Image: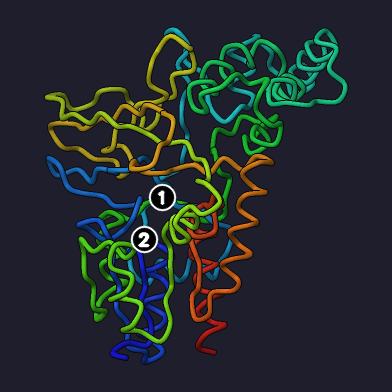
Amino acid sequence: MKYDYLIVGAGLFGATFAQKAKEAGKRVLVIDKRNHVGGNIYTEEVEGIQVHKYGAHIFHTNDRRVWEYVNRFAEFNRYTNSPMANYHGELYSLPFNMLTFNKMWGVVTPDEAKAKIEEQRKASGIEDPQNLEEQAISLVGTDIYEKLINGYTQKQWGRPCRELPAFIIKRLPVRFTYDNNYFNALYQGIPTEGYTAMVEKMLEGVEVRLGVDYLENRDTYSKIAAKTVYTGALDAYFDYCYGPLNYRSIRFETEVLDTENYQGNAVINYTDSETPYTRIIEHKHFVFGTQPKTVISREYSQEWTLGIEPYYPINDEPNNALCEKYKTLAQKEENVIFGGRLGQYRYYDMDAVILSALDAAEKEFE
């Protein structure tokens, strides 16, 4: 065997594991079916602007170990994620905070905002939230649900809020302060030279082959390394023997505009149901760009089918049960490590992906 580790996928999990393996003196080969490294955090330069090709990625973490690790490979700016919500031309601050409540109701104090939410919750008659709609109304009231959650969520998930589990909305921060920092993390920012440059630096000295589909060449590649780190889709590895796991996907429309500043913010969500896209990303604002032109991307949420890129695992009861069946098979695979968003069928923030890869590497090498 020519290599100690074959790493399938040059995204964050694969790149982190590869870097640690190289550091430990292991022989490593990384392959990826795309023609670039970085996975979904890949950025490419357009008009001097680092464009997030697969959607906006803002790095944030409370874990000092992860923050110190990524800063070995990139310089991060001070970008703070403060998206806006556009409802038929009315602009509201996200995450939901006192700026949102003031714009919606004219309230000024936290007690006034809480009283308004409680008034609307009582009027709804909801005591024990059973779905996303009921959970959202319990958290922020009917007005905010109707204007800023209902239409956006239906577009994002392709189904009515009453049919979605309550836990989804619990990821959304609600603050009774005038603080529009979405993540509120101790460390936050974006690499000044883009994520691709960061991943390339992580992979320095590691052999990388692009445009290689592991599943189509499994017989060849599984024989050249003592162990395999697999970050592709878990169900695809087992040829969908129990049926495919479900995801939501995204379609992007990206264009260069001959204007310096299109929308004045990196991220604006369109929360009405009539606007077909979920949000517009203006990439230059991630790094405070001053280029004469700008690049925007409109995001359209769509149903996932085999053959298109999976983005968000649908972690409802049927899919989680199906995932457990695949994980049982994965545990029987000798000398294969399954990692990352697709390999573990989990919605991972970037810092969690890196931390899981560091833990897997530590278990292997230390």
Q: How packed is label 1: few (under 14 Cα within 10 Å), some, or many (20 or more)?
A: some
Q: Amino acid at mark 2?
A: Gly
Picture coordinates of residue 47, whole percent (x, y): 12, 40
Task: Say whether residue 113 is left or right of residue 247.
Answer: right
Q: How packed is label 2: few (under 14 Cα within 10 Å), some, or many (20 or more)?
A: many
- Above or below, 22 against 253 in this view is below
Comparing 150 with 4, the one in front is 4
Comparing 275 with 66, the one in front is 275
Q: Amino acid at mark 1?
A: Arg
Residue positioned 41% across, 89% down in the render = 24
Q: Secondary structure at mark 2?
A: loop
Comparing 239 with 249, the one in front is 239
The number of discs equals 2
Picture coordinates of residue 365, whole percent (x, y): 50, 88
Give the image quarter of residue 127.
top right
Picture coordinates of residue 190, whole percent (x, y): 37, 51
Say the numbered circle drawn on residue 273. none
Q: Secondary structure at mark 1?
A: loop
Residue positioned 54% across, 58% down in the render = 344
Question: Mark 2 touching mark 1, by CB under 8 A?
Answer: no
Residue positioned 63% across, 64% down in the render = 328
Q: Going by the picture, which residue comes out furthest to the front?
A: 241
- For disc 1, the marked residue is 78
Task: Say whether residue 187 is left or right of residue 304.
Answer: right
Q: Earlier in the sequence, mark 2 or mark 1?
A: 2
Q: Quadrant of the C terminus?
A: bottom right
Residue positioned 23% across, 31% down in the render = 254
Picture coordinates of residue 115, whole percent (x, y): 81, 16
Task: Say whether residue 69 is left or right of residue 225.
Answer: right
- For disc 2, the marked residue is 11
Alpha carbon separation for disc pair 2 and 1: 23 Å
- Above or below, 254 against 53 in this view is above
